[in-house]
């Protein structure tokens, strides 16, 4: 008898086969006397289209909505039918006694396997391989510590509810609003509130009216200061007032009335989760979120140089300290030179915390010697970010002195503030990468009562600036923090760990908004289009608000942690009933309450005759979990 291993992709399947000593190549799989390794090609199976659920849905008609089938059946995708047939045949082969689920270790990976398993009609026992890196050592360790597939039933339930909820909301809302406005409109649980974030920022920029203001600066010889009011503000509304202050203090003597110098420490930054990696790559290199994810996936899957990238954790478990020590010693130059300064390993709670590790720990290099020379230029940039952050996490704090001086001149107050380096600590890894900050200047150590003549006074005209357009960096941050912007304090606290989508799907959401014409890029900046702004305008607030999808994501996350089967069923029933009620509301809103608007001519389409529109919607829902 043999064991069947089902991976998510051919490349992962070949890695698993190598570790298991499976070398015989066959059609769609690799085999040996003890194992057969096969693979999906992403999603081989998915939810049926509306017209496949019921023939009556082939026609797009408002009186056919909402579509609320008792069950959404599964189907095999035609483009990968041949590979599914291979996997199905192997699953049901008499020689196969058990199956190892080796798809990606996460919600979507679990869904991919379970859909294939169900569609193949397989009943054989399943074990789950759960790994955080694709090194041989990690795979071997994972194979030695597998759990029964049932241990992940709640994760699958969460994934299936996400999939079906996205189908119901996306299909119903997209059809209802497309019919209402005679336009090709795509509506989604995650993409629509994300679009609303973009539109809100663009409207703020459009409505912004710059205002003039002035600042008065005084030069005291060995230091400088800027005028402040009683609220520590530097803005002066009129030039007349600024000129009056200048005239008043010119040629006079200033007296120090407040002086302080404090030593401050800044600990190393947290390790990367996927979102923070994408944000920093966008800031430093202009990479889109999608590009960074693809590069990280390549470093994980093909190069075997980093751990699982689709993680939402920035922590490491306590028991990884010995492994971290080994990993640090295996880093090549130029990183090895920095590693030599680490002794002993720093085990701060801000880095090592079992309670903060989710399905996967933070992204770090793997414990194998990295081949930097074999990487593309862009791969090198991403690996460099990860390696430096990993080393820096184990370095001493950055220490600096913070100086503040308040000088009084004829009753007018001038503030001087600045920082000076004491010990670089972890920032030594980033030397030369950041420009010297303006406040990093030598400021004399003064005492109250010290006097300085005013040597020069200047008035500087300024203008208030509008909010900056969103970039991948700021939009990812806004998606991650969506639950934190809610005004209701109680609800905000409940949703503090919720956001729009998951780290693994946010890049696809941004890409989708651009693909359907709701947003456009201009360099690093992302703007909403007229079509996108109109869609947000006609949507009910419940569809554009982060509150709705944040509540869903929180419910799905909690569902994934349930161990009691009866409680799982109760949670599933309650969640799906709430989704169905929401679909009824959305369709009713489109029919009776949506305002009249005319969408741009180029978006009009003979959508009723199109058969691929709903297919595209389904593909989006898979990505935007």
Image: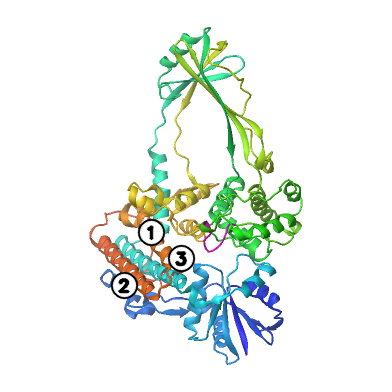
Give the image location of residue 235, x and y in percent. Answer: 44, 24
What coloring was used for the rendering? rainbow
Tell me if residue 53 comes above or below residue 245 in the rendering.
Answer: below
For residue 70, say whether it is visible.
yes
Tell me if residue 18 comes above or below residue 370 in the rendering.
Answer: below
Residue found at x 30% / y 69%: 577
Q: Which residues are magenta?
A: 356-362
> Viewer-proximal residue, 414 or 549?
414
Q: Count neighbours of disc 1 (C-alpha within 10 A) and say few if under 14, some if 14 to 19, many if 20 or more.
A: many
Q: Secondary structure at mark 2?
A: loop
Residue denoted by label 3 = 620
Whether the magenta-drawn stretch holds residue 361 is answered as yes
Sequence-wise, which precedes: disc 2 or disc 1? 2
Residue 571 is left or right of residue 328, and the answer is: left
Tell me if residue 218 comes above or below residue 593 in the rendering.
Answer: above
Residue denoted by label 1 = 549
Q: Count neighbours of disc 2 (C-alpha within 10 A) and say few if under 14, some if 14 to 19, many if 20 or more.
A: some
Residue found at x 75% / y 50%: 336
Front of the two marks 1 and 3: 1
Residue denoted by label 2 = 67
Residue most toward the left?
592
Q: Quadrant of residue 424?
A: top right
For residue 539, say whether it is visible.
no
Sequence-wise, which precedes: disc 2 or disc 3? 2
**Whole-number angstrom distance, CA of label 1 to CA of label 3:** 16 Å
> Viewer-proximal residue, 267 or 540?
267
Front of the two marks 2 and 1: 1
Give the image location of residue 342, x and y in percent. Answer: 71, 48
> Viewer-proximal residue, 536 or 124?
124
């Amino acid at each position: 008898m043999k064991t069947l291993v089902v991976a998510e992709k051919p490349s992962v399947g070949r890695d698993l086969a190598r570790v298991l000593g499976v070398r015989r190549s066959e059609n769609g799989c690799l085999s040996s006397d003890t194992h057969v390794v096969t693979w999906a090609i992403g999603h081989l199976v998915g939810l049926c289209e509306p017209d496949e659920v019921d023939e009556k849905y082939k026609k797009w008609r408002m009186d056919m909505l909402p579509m609320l089938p008792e069950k959404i059946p599964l189907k095999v995708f035609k483009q990968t039918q041949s590979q599914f047939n291979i996997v199905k045949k192997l699953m049901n082969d008499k020689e196969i006694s058990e199956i190892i689920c080796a798809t990606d270790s996460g919600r979507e990976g679990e869904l991919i396997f379970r859909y294939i398993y169900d569609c193949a009609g397989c009943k054989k026992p399943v074990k789950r391989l759960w790994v955080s890196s694709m090194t041989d050592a990690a795979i071997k360790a994972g194979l030695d510590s597998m759990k029964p597939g049932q241990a992940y039933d709640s994760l699958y339930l969460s994934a299936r509810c996400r999939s079906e909820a996205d189908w119901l909301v996306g299909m119903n809302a997209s059809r209802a609003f497309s019919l209402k406005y005679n336009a090709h409109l795509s509506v989604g649980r995650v993409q629509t509130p994300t679009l609303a974030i973009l539109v809100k920022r663009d409207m703020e920029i459009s409505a912004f009216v710059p205002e003039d203001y002035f600042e008065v600066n005084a030069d005291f010889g060995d230091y400088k200061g800027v005028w402040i009011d009683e609220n520590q503000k530097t803005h002066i509304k009129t030039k007349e007032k600024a000129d009056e202050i200048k005239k008043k203090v010119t040629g006079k003597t200033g007296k120090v009335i407040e002086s302080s110098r404090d030593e401050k420490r800044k600990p190393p930054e947290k390790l990367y989760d996927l979102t923070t990696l994408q944000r920093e790559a966008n800031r430093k290199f202009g990479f889109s979120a999608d590009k960074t994810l693809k590069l990280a996936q390549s470093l994980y899957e093909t190069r075997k140089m980093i751990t699982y990238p689709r993680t939402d954790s920035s922590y490491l478990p306590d028991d990884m300290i010995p492994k971290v020590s080994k990993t640090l010693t295996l880093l090549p130059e130029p990183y090895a030179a920095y590693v030599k300064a680490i002794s002993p390993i720093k085990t701060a709670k801000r880095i090592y915390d079992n309670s903060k590790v989710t399905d996967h720990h933070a992204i770090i290099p793997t414990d194998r010697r990295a081949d930097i020379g074999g990487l593309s230029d862009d791969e090198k940039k991403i690996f460099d970010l990860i390696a430096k952050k990993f080393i820096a996490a184990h370095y001493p704090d950055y220490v600096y002195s913070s100086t503040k001086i308040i000088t009084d001149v004829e009753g007018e107050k001038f503030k001087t503030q600045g920082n000076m380096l004491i010990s670089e600590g972890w920032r030594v890894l980033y030397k030369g990468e950041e420009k010297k900050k303006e406040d990093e200047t030598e400021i004399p150590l003064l005492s109250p009562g010290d006097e300085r003549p005013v040597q020069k006074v200047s008035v500087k005209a300024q203008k208030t600036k509008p909010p900056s357009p969103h970039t991948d960096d700021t939009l990812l941050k806004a998606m991650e923090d969506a639950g934190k912007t809610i005004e209701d304090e109680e609800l905000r606290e409940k949703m503090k760990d919720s956001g729009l989508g998951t780290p693994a799907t946010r890049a696809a959401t941004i890409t989708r908004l651009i693909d359907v014409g709701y947003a456009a890029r201009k360099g690093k900046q992302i703007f909403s289009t007229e079509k996108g702004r109109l869609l947000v305008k006609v949507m009910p607030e419940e569809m554009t608000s982060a509150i709705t999808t944040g509540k869903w994501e929180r419910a799905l996350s909690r569902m994934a942690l349930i161990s009691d089967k009866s409680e799982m069923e109760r949670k599933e029933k309650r969640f799906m009933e709430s989704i169905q009620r929401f679909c009824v509301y959305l369709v009713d809103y489109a029919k009776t309450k949506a305002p009249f608007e005319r969408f741009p001519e180029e978006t009009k389409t003979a959508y009723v005759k199109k058969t691929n529109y709903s297919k595209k919607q389904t593909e989006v829902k898979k990505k935007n979990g």
